[in-house]
């Protein structure tokens, strides 16, 4: 029997959820004996295969047009989609940008930043266009939500272990504990 295929990607956020995934440590090696990691920002292969995967995992908020494309592609190519972390589940801290016009956020980041000298806001058709930040489920259907900033390695391992066994994890009680 073929191993379940898993793909991960990150959108707008700090990548802390992928760091927490790596914090599974040696248990990650045991998990990789049971699954095939097809693509992830932490591997050379970045895009889920067109043939599809069993589990897709997205971390981070959707906050530019490329993130919309990435979320839709992941949804199309996975059987079960997991929103991993507060940014993916709720919009997280990235949503704080929504209190200001995008033009002001860009000016602050590229021009008025204390570490910037002679800053210029980049502009090109090749650069992602910012949009109001939002949770993943505001763009695509999500099947499993695992909040946390970031979720613990144990929580992530629990969710992945359940999904590998063909079960939708029940994230309540200890599995939902914030530290």
Image: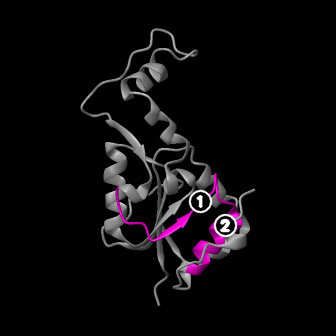
As drawn, the label of residue 69 is none
Q: Residue at x 57, y 43 (%)?
A: 14
Q: Residue at x 70, y 72 (%)?
A: 173
93 over 45 or under it: above or below: above
Residue placed most toward the observer, 90 or 82? 90
Q: Magenta stretch? A: 139-162
Say left or right for 133 vs 86.
Answer: left
85 over 116 or under it: above or below: below
As drawn, the label of residue 147 is 1
* Local secondary structure at mark 2: helix
Q: Give percent across and percent down for residue 32.
A: 59, 73
* Local secondary structure at mark 1: loop
Q: Give percent across and percent down for residue 132.
A: 38, 40
Residue placed most toward the observer, 117 or 63? 63
Q: Give percent across and percent down for residue 101.
A: 38, 27
Residue placed most toward the observer, 109 or 20? 109
Circle 1 Cα neighbour tier, 10 Å, few/some/many (<14 / 14–19 / ≥20): many
34 over 75 or under it: above or below: below
Outermost residue toward the top in this view:
118
Q: Are marks 2 and 1 in contact (CB under 8 Å)?
A: yes
Q: Is residue 141 magenta?
A: yes
Answer with the quarter of the image where residue 136 lies.
Answer: bottom left
Q: Residue at x 42, y 66 (%)?
A: 142
Q: Is residue 29 magenta?
A: no
Say which residue label 2 marks: 176
């Amino acid at each position: 029997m073929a191993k379940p295929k898993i793909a991960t990607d990150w959108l707008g956020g700090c990548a802390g959820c992928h760091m927490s995934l790596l914090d599974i440590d040696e248990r990650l090696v045991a998990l990789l004996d049971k699954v095939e990691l097809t693509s992830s920002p932490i591997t050379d292969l970045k895009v889920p295969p067109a043939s599809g995967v069993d589990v897709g995992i997205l971390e981070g908020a959707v906050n530019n047009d490329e993130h919309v494309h990435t979320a839709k592609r992941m949804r199309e190519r996975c059987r079960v989609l997991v929103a991993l972390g507060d940014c993916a589940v709720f919009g997280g801290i990235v949503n704080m940008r929504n209190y200001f016009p995008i033009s002001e956020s860009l000016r602050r980041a590229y021009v008025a930043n204390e570490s910037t000298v002679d800053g210029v806001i980049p502009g090109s058709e090749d650069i992602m266009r910012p949009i109001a930040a939002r949770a993943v489920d505001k763009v695509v259907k999500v099947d499993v939500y695992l909040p946390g900033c970031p979720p613990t390695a144990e929580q992530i391992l629990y969710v992945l272990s359940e999904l590998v066994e063909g079960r939708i994890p029940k994230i309540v009680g200890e599995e939902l504990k914030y530290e």
